[in-house]
Image (cartoon, rainbow, N blue to C red):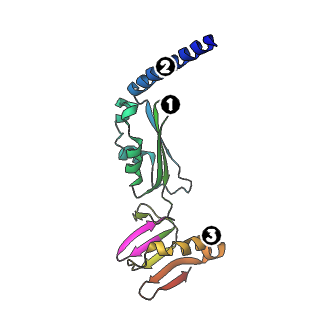
Amino acid sequence: TLLWCILSVLLVIYMVVAFSITENKAQQELCKGVDIDVHDDVGLEFVTVEDITHEIGNENNKYLTMKVCDINTHKLEKQLNAIDKIERVNCVIYNNSRLKIDVIPLVPVARVFNNGKSYYINREGKRMMADSRYQVDVPIIVAKFNENFNELSILPLLSYIKNDSTWNSLVSSIKINPCNNDIIIVPM
C-alpha cells in the first residue's frame, strides 16, 4: 500500500507539471489559420467567405500573427451576428490552433414594405435591409406597423403559409392595416 501511495503521489505531480507545461505552450501557440464555412443551403449567396474575411479584417491574415489565447471567439461571434445578412455564427479554436468560423446566412420568410422602408425578415423577425443585389421569392408584406402591431405579429401567419403547400403556392403578398387589424391576403 505504501508503494501505491508513492506511485499515486508521483502520478499526481507528473500530471500537474505536464498540464502546466502544455498550458504554457498552448498560451504561446500562434494561430495556424482561419477556416470559414458558409452553410448556404438555400443558395441565396447573401454571405460569402470573402465577405466574412473582410468583416473580421483578415485580408492580410492578421490572425496568423496572433496567439491563440488572444483570439476572443465570443467577441468575434458577437461582431458577426450583428451583420444583418447573418442568422447565426459559431467560432471555435481547434486543438490544431486553427480558428473555425461557421456561418449560417439569414433565410428570409418575407419582404416588408413599411413606411417607405424595404427589408427582409427571417422566421425570428431579424431584419435584413433589401438590396438590389439580392432577390428572393418570398411573400411581400405591405404595412404601416406601429408599436402594437409589428412584423413579429405576422410571423405565425407567414409560418402557416410556408408550411401549407396550397397556401404557399397561392399567396403573393399580404396587406396589413394595423389601425383596424385588417389583414388582406393577395393571391398570385
Q: Is residue 84 above or below residue 73?
A: below
Q: Is residue 109 above or below residue 57?
A: below
Could you tell me the amino acid type at mark 3? Answer: Asn
Q: Which residue is mark 1?
A: 95
**Residue located 50% across and 30% down the image:** 95
Q: Identify the mark nearer the N-term, 3 or 1.
A: 1
Q: Position of residue 88 (x, y in %)?
A: 48, 53
Q: Is residue 61 above or below residue 161?
A: above
Q: Position of residue 62 (x, y in %)?
A: 34, 35
Q: Which residue is mark 2?
A: 18
C-alpha separation, residue under disc 3 versus residue under disc 2:
56 Å
Could you tell me the amino acid type at mark 1? Answer: Asn
Question: Is residue 61 visible in the rendered structure shown here?
Answer: no
For the record, the magenta segment spans 111-122
Residue 116 colored magenta? yes
**Residue located 46% across and 30% down the image:** 97
C-alpha separation, residue under disc 3 versus residue under disc 1:
42 Å
Q: Residues within 10 Å of mark 3 (few under 14, many from 20)?
A: few
Which of 9/93 is in front?
9
Residue placed farthest to the bottom in the image?
A: 180
**In the image, is 2 to the left or to the right of 88?**
right
User: In the structure shown, which secondary structural element does the residue marked by tag 3 occupy?
Assistant: helix
Q: Identify the mark nearer the N-term, 1 or 2.
A: 2
Q: Identify the mark nearer the N-term, 3 or 2.
A: 2
User: In the structure shown, which secondary structural element does the residue marked by tag 2 occupy?
Assistant: helix
Main SS category, magenta section: strand
User: In the structure shown, which secondary structural element does the residue marked by tag 1 occupy?
Assistant: loop
Residue 104: mark in rendering: none
Residue 128 colored magenta? no
Look at the image and tell me in which quarter the C terminus lies: bottom right
Label 1 or label 2, whichever lies nearer to me, is: 2
Label 3 or label 1, whichever lies nearer to me, is: 1
